[in-house]
Amino acid sequence: MALDSGGVIYGVRLRSAFDYRYVGLTTKSAGVRLRQHLKVASTGRKTPFYDWLRKQDRAEVIADELHWVETLVELGRAEADWIAYLRRDSQPLLNLTDGGLGPTGVVWTTEMREAARIRSTGRPGISRFAEENPFHGRTHSAEQREKWSRERKGTYGGSENPNFGKFGGAHPSFGREMSEESRARLSNQRQGAGNPNFGLRASPETRAKMSDAQKGRPKPSSKRSAHTRHHTNKGVFKDSCQHCIADATRINDE
């Protein structure tokens, strides 16, 4: 169907109900547009209509062709007329706008924002990985990354950080613990060339700064002393500590 030949006004409802939940316009068929809506809903887009659509059995959702319109301009007017008509008839439409072509300039009220917040609270996000991610295999340009860097610089520093000054139970991450699988995966990702510091060496200036920052701090006089303080006295055993291994071997021999 060509764009300049008009299109169809359609209404979405359940097979078992007579009330329409959404009215839209399309230059394709109502069935094709419904399939597009279902696909968008599966990606997790959060609007009243898509939230309702995700809760339904797909086989029970249908789209009726309400009106065929000859021209594109009349198509937009017809959509607005149908939405107004069904609203006057007290049908529970989930449309956010009054319909029509072009930008609608929707301004969310406080009640609409609160309703959207309640709908999204506790809802797990939908993640798409590898080839399913629409950005798979692509990278942002250097200019775009530089722009974001400038825009975000200092945004979350100090008091601007939403978690600034939050400690203990007040911090949103309090009590959370990473699983052993996640720990192992992160460890493997950061080994060798995966380590962001792999092959890098601190400059003399940086080494001097690090040295100055550590001056005056009490430290163990030897690795053995550090082992005694941080492992033996605390009952900690580390596979990477040669003294822990030596002590364990000696105990086993005894």
Image (cartoon, helix red, strand yellow):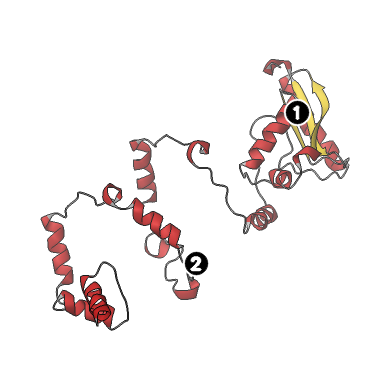
Residue 212 versus residue 184 in the image, above or below: below
Left or right for 204, reference 186? left
Quarter of the image for residue 102 reads top right
The residue tagged 2 is 172
Residue 126 versus residue 207 in the image, above or below: above
Q: Is residue 218 visible?
A: no
Front residue (pair 107, 30): 30
Q: Is residue 47 visible?
A: yes
Earlier-in-chain disc, 2 versus 1 = 1
Front residue (pair 192, 123): 192
What amino acid is at disc 2?
Answer: Pro
What amino acid is at disc 1?
Answer: Gly
Left or right for 201, reference 7? left
Checking the image for residue 31, the label placed there is 1
Q: Secondary structure at mark 1?
A: helix
Residue plotted at (78% across, 17% down): 70
Q: Secondary structure at mark 2?
A: loop
In the picture as drawn, the residue positioned furthest to the front comes out as: 253
What percent of the width, then of the height, locates residue 233? 28, 84
Checking the image for residue 46, the label placed there is none
Residue 242 versus residue 98 in the image, above or below: below
Quarter of the image for residue 18 reads top right
What percent of the width, then of the height, locates residue 231? 28, 78
Q: Are marks 2 and 1 in contact (CB under 8 Å)?
A: no
What percent of the width, then of the height, locates residue 189? 35, 51
Count of labels in the image: 2
Residue plotted at (69% across, 52% down): 112
What percent of the width, then of the height, locates residue 206? 16, 58
Residue plotted at (76% across, 43% down): 57
Left or right for 34, reference 163? right
**Few, some or many residues within 10 Å of mark 2 (<14, 14–19, 20+):** few
